[in-house]
Amino acid sequence: MVYLSLGSNLGDRFAFLQIAVGMIAYRLGNVPHCSPVYETPAWGFESTPFLNACIAIETDYSPMEVLSIVLDIERFLGRHRPSDQDGYQARTIDIDLLFHDQKVIDNKALQLPHPRMAQRRFILAPLVDLAPDFFHPIAQQNCATLLKECPDPAVIHPHKKTLFPTNPQKYLAVEGLIGAGKTAFAQALATAINGRLLLENFVKNPYLADFYKSPEKFALQVETFFLEDRQRQQQHFFAREEKHPVVADYTLEKSLLFAQMNLQEKQLQDYTQRHQEITKQLPVPEGVVYLDVSVDRAGNNIKHRGRKMEEELSTDYLRQLDKAYTQWQNATTLPLLVLSTNDMDFVHNKSDLYRLLYRFFRHHF
């Protein structure tokens, strides 16, 4: 078993802890247990209080691989470790490797067990909640005894919120209105969980620009191309078996949703039959994140990103699409997480992106 200590004293402290737990579960391995969270005074410098916790991990990664991955998670969450002469600093996230089974390592890059854990109550208290009998191979004592004999006088307090272990999904998809930011969030989520990106090739559709100008005339061509192109793309993509999770910026149910909006009755009957034949051969997302944005906000996003083919996209069409997506949310059997993004700019504002990721990692599909 591997044990990590987590801490944060900048920004939304609890959110950073929860995001870190989720990223660790996706990148390192199963997180069967999270300790209670404690509020603790800053150790070794004057600053705002920390929230601290410990987690257990089941992983096949070596100690150096674990260290490399947790440092990358820290960087993603805005942590930049100072040099030794800079001293301690406030940070959005701090992840320390405490134990990797009973391994003992002492080199410039890594020391195991953590060399200062016996002097730090903010580490030992949550660790004892998880593993009181875990044996320290150098101190020759278990964790409960180390806490009992800890010289640190700090007073720590239980926090009201509880961390949720994350159950990683192998295939996730992002849905929403045109202009909701599906691709941007899919890219950020894939980075967070070290996933493979599956992005829609909308620019390849030779009928799309004409469709926005004259929907009735080009509806069948545009929807048929999308369906067949998505089929080819997914067949090729999923032919490779990899351990990394997949994050797509569309679902195949989207094809049917748009067809129901745009096609005539006879066209829709033929299209629906073809859609059923195709989808039963392809994997189904284990979770779908729906980015809920108003029509006005989606229209502004479309305007600001400046894609020429979208210049003819009308507000009325977006309203019809929004209504269709609302009906789809009520009808789909896919596991769904709806995230409102009207008050966010997660493309340009990291704080907003962290808010979305926090909501994602607090959810269980």
Image: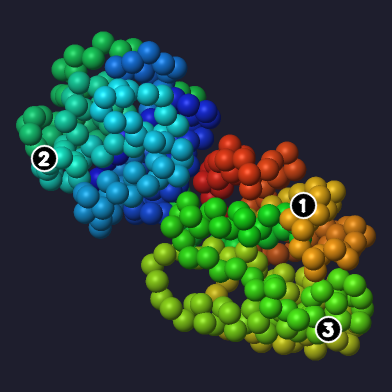
Rendered location of residue 128, percent (x, y): 26, 29
| Of callouts 2 and 1, the N-terminal one | 2
Rendered view: 216 above or below 286 = below
- Spatial distance from mark 1 to mark 3, Cα to Cα? 29 Å
| Residue identified by numbered label 3 | 220
Q: Is residue 336 visible?
A: no
Question: Nearer the observer, disc 3 or disc 2?
Answer: 2
- Residue at 42% x, 29% y: name it: 91
The circle drawn on residue 106 is 2
Q: Is residue 167 left or right of residue 342?
A: left
**Place of residue 160 in the rendered image (x, y in percent of width and height, measured from the top left):** 49, 24
Residue 109 on image: x %, y %: 19, 42
Q: Position of residue 88 (x, y in %)?
A: 32, 23
**On the picture, is 332 further left or further right than 197?**
right
Circle 3 packing at 10 Å, graded few (<14), some (14-19), many (20+), is: many
Q: Are marks 1 and 3 in contact (CB under 8 Å)?
A: no
Point out the tag, 3 or 2, that comes first from the N-terminus. 2
Q: Which residue is mark 1?
A: 304
Check contact, mark 3 vs mark 2: CB within 8 A: no
User: Alpha-carbon distance for marks 3 and 2?
Assistant: 66 Å
Q: Secondary structure at mark 3?
A: helix
Q: Residue at x 26, y 24 (%)?
A: 85
